Amino acid sequence: MAQYPRVLPLGDTGFTVEFGDTVDPAIHDRVLAFARAAGSLGLRGLQEIVPTYRSAAVFFDPVQVDAPALMDRLRAIAESPPVSSVEAARLVEIAVLYGGEFGPDLSDVAAFARLTPDEVIVLHTSVDYRVFMLGFSPGFPYLGPVPEPLGIPRLSEPRARVPAGSVGLAGSQTGIYPLESPGGWRIIGRTPLRLYDPAREAPFLLQAGDRVRFRPIDREAYDRLAERFVH
């Protein structure tokens, strides 16, 4: 049985620091605490730390870094108890127009959950979701866990085109497509907010550890917001 935390090579320019083998908020808290602690040290040659569900990827410049020494340093940080509890998460509200052309799978999700479409919306907006990680495409947030009735499987065949801003469900997760792309999540709505903008000082609207709260809006409100946030 694996012992955690553990540090594993990730090619010749990185390490993976693992804290467990399940999707668990407590494990994710340890990942976030490690990422903050390692990032705050200003280690020479350290390029990027990427938190995920249960691990953190650490990338470095092999010309500037003694890899074995860095591995030992990362292991020591990972094994040290956090100085304090995880800092208060930032809460980000995401406005969503549910159903209709913007949420083509809402009725199917409702049938799966044995709820009405309106009840699905109420349930989806009833909790705050943790941003476990960003991935798949720039700024795509993996959020969860969703209320149990909404744990619907992905589509059997992915769509070739999912519009930017689409809000989807897949298993125990919900997510938002920041860019138009193929995708197999069940689409229940769309936000006019721009999750990824390379021209912004902070290109990503969300980051690992944030909390997300969805807020239902009507078409008029969507159009007003869309004038300010063009995907």
Image: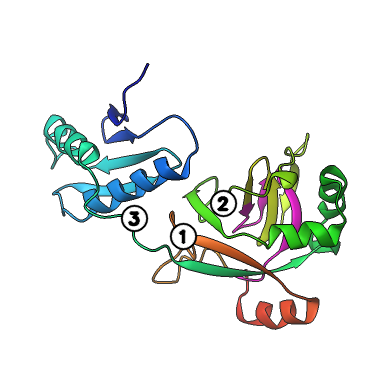
Residue at x-position 49% and y-position 67%: 91
Q: Is residue 145 left or right of residue 162?
A: left
Q: Is residue 91 left or right of residue 147?
A: left
In the rendered structure, which disc, 1 or 3, sits on the residue that comes first in sequence? Answer: 3
The picture places residue 18, in percent across and down from the top left corner, at: 35, 33
| Front-lying residue, 172 or 74 | 172
Distance between mark 1 and mark 3 Cα atoms? 11 Å
Q: Amino acid at mark 1?
A: Asp
Q: Amino acid at mark 3?
A: Val
Vertical relation: 92 (above or below) 220 = above
Crowding around mark 3 (Cα neighbors within 10 Å: few <14, some 14 to 19, many 20+) is some
Which residue is the site of mark 2?
Answer: 143
| Disc ID at residue 166 | none
Vertical relation: 152 (above or below) 176 = above
Task: For mark 2, give the secondary structure.
Answer: strand
In the rendered structure, which disc, 1 or 2, sits on the residue that comes first in sequence? Answer: 2
Q: Which residues are magenta?
A: 175-193
Distance between mark 1 and mark 2 Cα atoms? 9 Å
Which residue is the site of mark 1?
Answer: 210
Crowding around mark 1 (Cα neighbors within 10 Å: few <14, some 14 to 19, many 20+) is many
Residue at x-position 81% and y-position 59%: 119
Q: Is residue 27 magenta?
A: no
Q: Amino acid at mark 2?
A: Leu
Residue at x-position 46% and y-position 60%: 210
Residue at x-position 77% and y-position 39%: 155
Which residue is the site of mark 3?
Answer: 86
Location of the C terminus by quadrant is: bottom right
The picture places residue 109, in percent across and down from the top left corner, at: 81, 48
Q: Is residue 50 left or right of residue 60?
A: right
Q: Quadrant of residue 213?
A: bottom right
| Front-lying residue, 168 or 150 | 150
